[in-house]
């Protein structure tokens, strides 16, 4: 793992290790409420993924497997053999990449406002175009218009949580934005990984997510009876911020059940 980067992270609590992975273009602080609450029973580790927050942002494409390898190197540093990987959106793609490449490090997967599907060709192309744009024009040119789509419709974008999210997004280095856009465009479909009942896996979704269609998740879980789907009301693509208590409760419920 010589090409991994040393991730910035926060850690709290003791017990079964739980990783909280943020999505694009965010950082670990989106999980602040869940980290504070779940650390009463779990060892919670929340890193900034490569290219985000205070972690390094090297040049090049960031494959989801590379992001997962960075996280595994962090687990090594912390002496953690195996964790439950909770991934928000792109963080979920990273959790699935870990499940594919290093299943021995994965005690369970929770996809939070995330899914296992690859990009359709037009979306992959749009990401590659935006990666070029980020490098040429900067982060704001690409992420500046994204805020409204992250929250449920009719959210006040002048609210404190929305300001917080905007600040995190605009602080993401252009190299990080480009790196993950290229990596997400290239990622493979991971539905096959969800077919096996072990390790346990679940999805938490916002009913009003404007980025990930609930009907796609419902169709997926209808085919995979062991894959549970928890739908949170009054939440969009950021359930951990829009409905922090309900998100914590859903996570606590899953993690406690899987621990038995
Ligand atoms: C995220 O929130 O991480 C992104 O919306 C993921 C994506 O663009 O597929």
Image: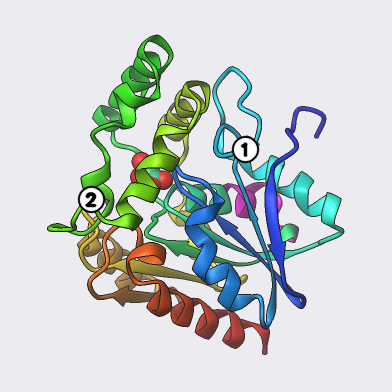
Q: Is residue 77 left or right of residue 200?
A: right
Quadrant showing the C terminus? bottom right
- Which of pointers 1 and 2 lies earlier in the amino acid sequence? 1
Q: Nearer the viewer, residue 184 or 36?
A: 36
236 left or right of 52? left
Query: Residue tagged by mark 2?
Result: 158
Name which residue lies at 32% across and 66% down: 242
Residue 252 lies, in percent from the top left, at: 54, 81
- Residue 237 image point, x, y percent: 31, 56
Judging depth in this view, the residue of 87 and 6 nearest the camera is 6
Q: Quadrant of the N terminus?
A: top right
Q: Secondary structure at mark 2?
A: loop
What's drawn in magenta, residue-wise?
97-104
Membership of 160 in magenta stretch: no
Q: Does residue 164 lie above or below 124 as drawn?
A: below
The part of the image, by quadrant, that contains residue 234 is bottom left
3D distance between C-alphas at marks 1 and 2 = 25 Å
Q: Is residue 100 magenta?
A: yes
- Is residue 129 at least partly visible in the picture? yes
Q: Which mark is residue 54?
A: 1
Instruction: Give how far across and how far down residue 240 sits, in percent.
Output: 41, 65
């Amino acid at each position: 793992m010589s090409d991994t980067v040393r991730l910035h992270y926060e850690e709290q609590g003791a017990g079964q290790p739980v990783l909280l992975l943020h999505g694009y273009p965010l950082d670990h602080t989106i999980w602040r409420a869940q980290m504070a609450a779940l650390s009463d029973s779990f060892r919670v580790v929340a890193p900034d993924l490569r290219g985000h927050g205070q972690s390094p942002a090297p040049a090049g494409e960031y494959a989801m497997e590379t992001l997962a390898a960075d996280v595994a190197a962090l687990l090594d540093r912390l002496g953690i053999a195996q964790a439950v990987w909770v991934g928000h959106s792109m963080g979920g793609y990273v959790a699935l990449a870990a499940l594919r490449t290093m299943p021995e490090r994965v005690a369970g997967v929770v996809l939070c406002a995330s899914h296992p599907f690859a990009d359709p060709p037009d979306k992959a192309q749009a990401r590659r175009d935006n990666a070029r744009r980020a490098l040429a024009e900067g982060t704001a040119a690409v992420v500046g218009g994204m805020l409204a789509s992250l929250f449920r419709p009719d959210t006040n974008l002048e609210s404190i949580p929305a300001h917080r999210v905007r600040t995190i997004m605009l602080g993401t280095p252009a190299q990080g934005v480009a790196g993950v856009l290229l990596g997400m465009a290239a990622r493979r479909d991971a539905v096959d990984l969800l077919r096996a009942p072990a390790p346990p896996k679940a999805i938490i979704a916002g009913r009003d997510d404007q980025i990930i269609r609930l009907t796609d998740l419902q169709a997926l879980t209808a085919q995979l009876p062991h894959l549970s789907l928890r739908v949170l009301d009054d939440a969009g693509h950021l359930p951990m911020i829009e409905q922090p208590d309900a998100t914590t409760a859903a996570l606590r419920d899953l993690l406690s059940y899987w621990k038995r």
